[in-house]
């Protein structure tokens, strides 16, 4: 790294904006000349890797099509691709990133904290570690037949490198080791590891003996070492090496990763704080929702009695205003119910009352309850005729809530003179219910987001159609609680189809019959 040379970097990221930001920051890195190429998916990345040489890859942790960095590493292993990889991850993904580093990632950076300095450090550490790993392989291949003491350790390497025998005594070390300990190199040679690094010699020797006896290297261990600058974190790799006189020892590579560890700890503390804040927010929302329910019920009753003439005759103008107020109270009640449902879902307190539910009946009930809302919007709401009578095994009330949320969402995003149609499919073991609309549609990149809590797709939200962003999230959780699946299919301008499945009643009865048969077989004759 002392000589500045051209570094070729491949960026694999499905988000062109994120890739552009990385490119912009790389231009300001003080690591020599950098050439970058961009791939929007794994296949394109593989093509570029086959066509050109790259020194490093910046890889997005999650690509389109559900492809994760884990999938990419498995594919790289199959293709025997050895280019070092830095994972680019979102906030809160540090655990995943650490797991990926165990699989072969050299480093990781977070999107929220990307800067030229962070990228420069990641490039430096990655190329430095890659040089160490390359050197490690060369040592394993070449130093077995040559006395290690006759070889010169590369003092240009910034990482600490030393060789100790099976008793923990250091035979050779590089200048970086001496600098870290604040000692002349000649004073480092001959010391026991425990004496030099102020650690437990017995534990260290026991670990080294295991490596010597098994011949298996121990890589990526994170430990604190006392240096002249205080305690610092190091990533330690150990490899067995047989000495020329027949004795065995261990080669140790120690790379300073203190800044990375501190950044990771800071991120973990931030995540812990966010979790606590989210818990407090949820508790506050539940408390406020409960407090609002009672006055809303009182207002609802007063308005209802007034419109029914209990308090005397009213003018048409007052009636119109009361109807507006009544609809507003209904919307507020719906919002409160959603907040309370989310609280129950996140607390794991959903109570299921499963039974046989006739699909024709529940679809009729759902369309009847929302027919007025659809008519008011100028949208046609219908159910395609069922070819045969079908039933599912689930909670009727929760399934009604799912249907209401999906139909209300379709009404919200379907323009005047549009149509919403409900279809039913027999999948054998499951029943699929589809809500198909002629609405504005959803961008492909946004489909996976619509089931997130408080999700609002900005391109679709217009005047009069804002919501809490909880309806589809609740629908997803209620479907999954009943053992079903839910997904969306859509294209901008072509409407959307929201589909969910539930276990078929006949399949449930077959399973119950099989369980009874198994119990009967176990009974004594």
Image (cartoon, rainbow, N blue to C red):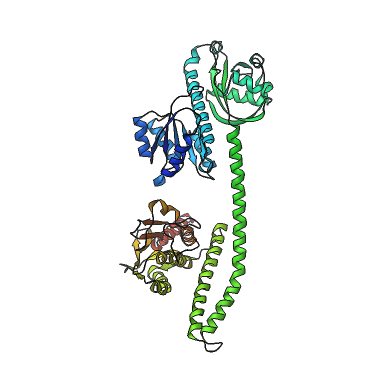
The number of discs equals 0
- Measuring 52% from the left and 40% from the top, which residue is drawn there? 114
Judged left or right of residue 423, residue 111 is right
| Residue 291 visible in the snapshot | yes
Judged left or right of residue 318, residue 230 is right
**Could you say which is closer to the camera, residue 294 or residue 518?**
294
**Above or below, 68 relative to 163:** below
Q: Residue 37 sits in which quadrant?
A: top left
Judged left or right of residue 480, residue 227 is right
| Residue 15 visible in the snapshot | no
Instruction: Provide residue 371's location: percent of width, then percent of height.
Output: 40, 73
Q: Residue 300 sits in which quadrant?
A: bottom right
Instruction: Provide residue 499's location: percent of width, then percent of height.
Output: 39, 59
Instruction: Provide residue 149's location: percent of width, then percent of height.
Output: 56, 12
Instruction: Provide residue 524's location: percent of width, then percent of height.
Output: 49, 56
**Above or below, 184 relative to 11:** above
């Amino acid at each position: 790294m002392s000589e500045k040379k051209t570094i070729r970097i491949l960026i694999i990221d499905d988000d062109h904006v994120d890739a552009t930001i990385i490119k912009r920051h790389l231009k300001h890195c003080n690591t020599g000349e950098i050439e970058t190429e961009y791939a929007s998916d794994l296949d394109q990345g593989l093509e570029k890797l086959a066509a050109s040489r790259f020194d490093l890859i910046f890889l997005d942790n999650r690509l389109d099509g559900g492809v994760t960095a884990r999938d990419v590493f498995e594919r790289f292993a199959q293709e025997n691709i050895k280019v070092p990889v830095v994972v680019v991850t979102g906030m809160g993904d540090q655990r995943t990133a650490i797991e990926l580093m165990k699989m072969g990632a050299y480093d990781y950076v977070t999107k929220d904290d990307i800067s030229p300095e962070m990228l420069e450090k990641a490039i430096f550490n990655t190329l430095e570690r890659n040089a160490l790993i390359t050197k490690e392989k060369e040592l394993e291949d070449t130093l077995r037949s040559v006395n290690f003491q006759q070889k010169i350790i590369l003092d240009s390497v910034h990482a600490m490198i030393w060789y100790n025998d099976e008793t923990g005594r250091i035979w050779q070390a590089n200048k970086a080791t001496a600098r870290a300990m604040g000692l002349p190199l000649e004073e480092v040679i001959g010391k026991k590891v425990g004496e030099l690094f102020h650690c437990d010699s017995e534990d260290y020797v026991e670990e080294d003996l295991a490596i010597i006896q098994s011949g298996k290297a121990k890589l990526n261990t994170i430990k604190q070492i006392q240096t002249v600058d205080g305690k610092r974190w190091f990533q330690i790799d150990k490899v067995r090496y047989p000495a020329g006189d027949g004795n065995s020892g261990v080669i140790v590579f120690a790379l300073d990763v203190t800044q990375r560890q501190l950044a990771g700890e800071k991120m973990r503390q931030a995540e812990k704080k966010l979790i606590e804040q989210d818990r407090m927010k949820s508790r506050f929302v539940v408390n406020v929702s409960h407090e609002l329910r009672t006055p809303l019920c009182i207002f609802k009753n007063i308005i209802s009695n007034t419109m029914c003439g209990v308090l005397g005759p009213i003018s048409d103008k007052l009636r119109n205003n009361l109807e507006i107020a009544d609809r507003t109270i209904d919307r507020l009640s719906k919002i409160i119910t959603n907040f309370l449902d989310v609280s129950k879902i996140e607390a794991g307190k959903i109570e299921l009352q499963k039974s046989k539910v006739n699909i024709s009946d529940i679809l009729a009930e759902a369309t009847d309850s929302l027919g007025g809302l659809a008519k008011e919007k100028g949208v046609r709401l219908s159910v395609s005729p069922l070819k045969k009578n079908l039933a599912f095994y689930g909670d009727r009330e929760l399934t009604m809530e799912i249907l209401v949320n999906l139909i209300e969402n379709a009404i919200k995003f379907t323009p005047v003179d549009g149509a919403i149609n409900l279809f039913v499919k027999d999948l054998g073991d499951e029943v699929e219910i589809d809500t198909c609309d002629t609405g504005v549609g959803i961008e492909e990149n946004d489909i996976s987001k619509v089931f997130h809590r408080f999700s609002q797709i900005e391109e679709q939200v217009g005047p009069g159609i804002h919501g809490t962003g909880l309806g589809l999230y609740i629908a997803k959780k209620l479907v999954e609680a009943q053992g079903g699946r839910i997904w969306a299919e859509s294209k901008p301008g072509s409407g959307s189809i929201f589909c969910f499945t539930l276990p078929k009643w006949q399949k449930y009865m077959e399973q119950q019959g099989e369980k009874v048969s198994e119990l009967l077989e176990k009974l004594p004759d």
